[in-house]
Image: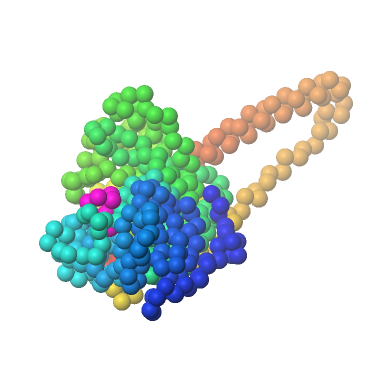
Amino acid sequence: MKLFKIATAVALIYNAQTVGGDCSFDEISVESSPGFTISIEKEYKMLEDTRSQMKYGLYCDSQPSNVDGIDRWFKVPVSSVGVRIPLASGFLEALGHRDTLKAAESPGNLTNICLGNIQPLESSTVDIVFSTNTTSDGEKTVALPADDTLTPLQKAEWIKFVAAFYNDEKAASSLYSSISAAYECHWSNLQHLAQQPHAYWVQYADKQPQIIDSAYQKSLLAGAGATNDTKEPLSDPTDPSKFQEAIKDADFVFDQTFLTEYGQRASEWYEKFAYPDPQNSGASFLCSRNIWRTDGYTSKDGVSNFPEFGYVRPDLVLQDIISVMEPTYEPKYQRRWMLWLGGTNENTVVIDSSNYNCDSPWITQVAKCEARTDFTGEDGSSSDSSSDSSSSDDEGKSEGSSGRAGKIAGGVVAAAAVIALAVVALHYYNKRRRNLRIQALAQQAEFGGHSPQARRFS
């Protein structure tokens, strides 16, 4: 992945092309190969969804005639929207078009407290429906990516696709550019760790444990400085011991299993993944109680906000994961979505006016990231503790050359053995110290006495 983009290479192209009346289209660049393109024609603009093999024609006044190859036409800007995918709601919030969201497949599954009275789709008439597929609502349907095969930045760039239906691509490009710059800056900053943590993303689905190796999850772990070399496919996916053996070396596990036993989800997780005695399992991440999830920020009904806002802000998701594995990187950073499943309390944060301001929403605000190369993840950033290994060889001067050589050779071998043992010991000491520190920080967060509902996000 290219970590830094030269400013001139990413300069967005804004050529406003008037197509009739007061309507104009802004020509913009698409940067991350997200699976769609935008092109401007004389009387319309075309969005091509290369993932779904669909072409959408967008016009301002009258639908152009004698145009071949367009699958669906939409008059823009649209004024009423329905959603069957939470991601669409997040994009509308970030673009400032939440007022156009009128209906949803499951209104109760939307967590944005700033929305108006959202009606069920079945009883509503809207201009367009953003869905997980291209057929759910006939000619009004437009699909958005619903899986994790895209990287975080690729998925976030679909904000430009949604913005095209509002003729608001310029604003979307500006926001995405800031998000992308922050994401890549944090990514680069975490590539100098003295000891990389080892992490996996997992789930229990289809009655078996699974290691997730999708582009979205792997990119986030790599961006946080973790090693995440995915194991070969399990020889017997239905055998929990095979899964346990594959992830036993993990320092951290990030889970996206559908869990229902609120207040007892840790026990539910142990049961699903067949860990009857987790503390004595021999798994590193269980000894340090480092199981994390993305549903730590929810509606009052317990619906996770992550599918709605998280995919829109990959820079914040990355910072969340970094704060879990490297808490000294940004000591004052407050996680938004990450939930520590290793504790006895499930301290989720309920989205409300104390942590989300509808007049100044944090989803639209991108903090600047300062590039740095000095963060190593250790308590002291300096590693210049070179030892003085010089010694007098006066004793050897009276010996024969062969005897001296043998003594030196033996000394070198012995020194190498000592150094090797010291390196191994230091590795496990630092690893143990890291886990103890992270566990202590997590326990402090759990028992610190602060009400999670009162937490504010800067």
Q: Position of residue 374 (x, y in %)?
A: 59, 56
Outermost residue to the left:
123
| Colour setting | rainbow
- Report the label total: 0
Residue visible at 52% across and 59% down? 185
Outermost residue to the bottom:
22
Residue visible at 45% across and 61% down? 39
Corner quadrant of residue 362: bottom left
Could you tell me if residue 430 is visible in this image? yes
Magenta segment, prevailing SS (helix, strand or loop): loop
Where is 379 relative to 256, above or below? below
Could you tell me if residue 323 is visible in this image? no
Q: Position of residue 99 (x, y in %)?
A: 25, 72
Corner quadrant of residue 350: bottom left
Residue visible at 35% across and 51% down? 54
Q: Position of residue 312 (x, y in %)?
A: 37, 60
Outermost residue to the front:
66
The foreground one among 208 and 308 is: 308
196 vs 334, left or right, is: right
Where is 69 relative to 362, above or below? above
Give the position of the C terminus as an image quadrant: bottom left
Where is 33 relative to 362, above or below? above
Corner quadrant of residue 237: top left
Q: Does the magenta-highlighted stretch encompass residue 400?
A: no
Residue visible at 27% across and 43% down? 257
Write down the region rendered in magenta.
130-136
The foreground one among 67 and 117 is: 67
The foreground one among 274 and 208 is: 208
Q: Position of residue 318 (x, y in %)?
A: 43, 55
